[in-house]
Image (spheres, helix red, strand yellow):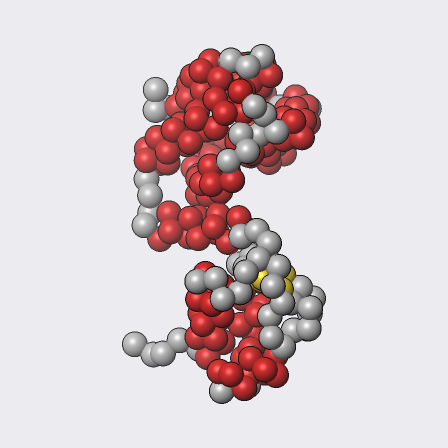
């Protein structure tokens, strides 16, 4: 097996330094020249390594090394890692449905008890978009993703939000296939909108167990896993 490219090796070393705490959130990273001398590689390799780490959400900054810092939050990196892991292991739809029901159910119980209000406002805005998109499967799907993500974020639990987002990203191909087979798109999306409305209403009223139960029926019902 051929060795990995130099920039990937450099990215791995910097990632290790971030993960083990040598560089903390918000800390400035050394410049390209210093990193190149440290690792014994060209500045081009260092530059590409930093771009990769930026894409993974571990590093933030401009186009040059000066000003680059460790990201203050790595939720994007966590979500991407979970998504990639699920895709590589070819996690079946049945398992994804079970995981979503467990994570979203508990998240909605937390959101109903002590919600992040800005997230509930985002869920309400996504619901308004869904009401206007009963003839547009793509627009509806985007609003649906935003709705569920906002409700889980309303729990205040960042780990649950990352896991839920990874589940949704992995389920995208299943959702597209399911919508393509729907004969009465307008009627189906109208029904799904009513289910979303009931879920949000339960959260707003502090009925966490009801919100969790409604969400499970909603997810299992759509994917035929009742």
The spot of residue 217 in percent (x, y) is: 42, 18
- Front-most of 81 and 111? 111
Horizontal side, residue 8 vs residue 224: left or right? right
Q: Can see residue 163?
A: yes
Question: Dividing the picture into quarters, in which one does residue 213 lie?
Answer: top left
Question: Dividing the picture into quarters, in which one does residue 9 lie?
Answer: bottom left
Instruction: Tell me the quarter of the image containing the N terminus.
Output: bottom left
Horizontal side, residue 90 vs residue 111: left or right? left
Horizontal side, residue 37 vs residue 3: left or right? right
Q: Residue at x 42, y 48 (%)?
A: 82
Residue 44 higher or lower than 180, as above or below: below
Q: Residue at x 60, y 54 (%)?
A: 72
Q: Residue at x 62, y 59 (%)?
A: 26
The spot of residue 54 in percent (x, y) is: 58, 62
The spot of residue 212 in percent (x, y) is: 45, 20
- Front-most of 69 and 168? 69
Residue 6 higher or lower than 59, as above or below: below
Residue 4 higher or lower than 80, as above or below: below
The spot of residue 61 in percent (x, y) is: 67, 64
Question: Dividing the picture into quarters, in which one does residue 185 lie?
Answer: top right
- Front-most of 197 and 121? 121
How many callouts does the rendering have?
0
Q: Can see residue 8?
A: no
Q: Residue at x 34, y 20 (%)?
A: 226
């Amino acid at each position: 097996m051929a060795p990995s490219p130099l920039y990937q090796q450099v990215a791995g070393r910097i990632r290790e330094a971030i993960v083990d705490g040598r560089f903390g959130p918000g800390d400035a990273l050394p410049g390209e020249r210093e990193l190149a001398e440290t690792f014994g590689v060209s500045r081009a390799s260092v530059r590409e390594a930093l771009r990769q780490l930026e894409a993974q959400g571990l590093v933030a900054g401009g186009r040059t090394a000066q000003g680059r810092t460790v990201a203050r939050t790595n939720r994007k990196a966590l979500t991407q890692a979970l998504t990639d892991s699920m895709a590589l292991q070819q996690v079946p739809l049945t398992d994804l449905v079970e995981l979503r029901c467990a994570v979203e159910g508990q998240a909605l119980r937390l959101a109903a008890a002590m919600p992040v209000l800005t997230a509930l406002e985002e869920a309400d805005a996504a619901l308004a978009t869904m009401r206007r998109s009963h003839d547009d499967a793509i627009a509806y799907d985007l609003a649906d993703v935003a709705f569920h993500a906002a409700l889980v974020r309303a729990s205040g639990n960042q780990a649950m939000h990352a896991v839920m987002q990874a589940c949704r990203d992995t389920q995208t191909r299943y959702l597209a296939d399911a919508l393509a087979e729907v004969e009465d798109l307008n009627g189906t999306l109208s029904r799904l909108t009513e289910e979303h409305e009931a879920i949000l209403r339960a959260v707003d009223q502090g009925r966490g167990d009801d919100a969790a139960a409604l969400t499970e029926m909603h997810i299992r019902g759509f994917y035929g896993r009742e």
